[in-house]
Amino acid sequence: MRFDDGSFLVFETESVYQASWLAYPGKFVELLGYKPGPLGALLSIPATNILCLHLVTEATTINDISAMLRVTGLMQAQHPSALSPLLYWWDGSSVQPISGHDGEDVHLFVPDELASIL
């Protein structure tokens, strides 16, 4: 999906367990046939049956993050099995949230390792 010059993939299935792949991003990416680089991936789980993915490369920009946050928020707000408007970063070994939501606004807190390429 392309949105405001940002790009990412949206995986929507009939399974209510799709979002559980957030716990196993390495296996998920491998099963899709992608090779993650050393910068990992951005992920979001707006609903139980949706997972969004952006493989982070040197070409990744703040536009990719903005697009994912915006679309994730829209999907989460409108979906009957809504889950989370947050954005996560998988650094190749662990998954950590890089955004927060205070009920009105989404706040971004990007780790130094990820910020260095943006």
Image: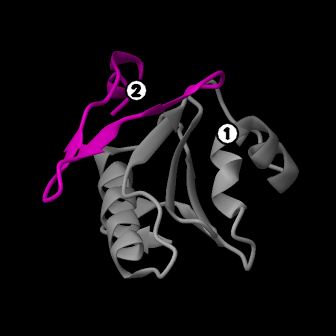
> x%, y% of residue 76?
40, 70
Res 5 seen here: no
Q: Quadrant of residue 16?
A: bottom right
Q: Residue at x 81, y 40 (%)?
A: 27
The image shows residue 75, relative to residue 9, as above or below, that is below
Q: Quadrant of residue 108?
A: top left
Position of 91 with respect to 86 (left or right) is right
For the residues bearing labels 2 and 1, Cβ distance under 8 angstroms: no
Please say whether residue 102 is one of the residues in the magenta stretch. Answer: yes
- Amino acid type, callout 2: Leu
**Which residue is denoted by mark 1 in the rendering?**
23
User: Distance of mark 2 from mark 1, alpha carbons?
Assistant: 20 Å
Position of 66 with respect to 1 (left or right) is left
Position of 12 with respect to 30 (left or right) is left
Checking the image for residue 114, the label placed there is 2
> x%, y% of residue 54?
54, 51
Position of 27 with respect to 54 (left or right) is right
Lower position in the chain sequence, tag 2 or tag 1 = 1
The image shows residue 34, relative to residue 57, as above or below, that is below
Magenta-tinted stretch: 91-118
Which secondary structure, mark 2? helix
Q: Residue at x 48, y 34 (%)?
A: 58
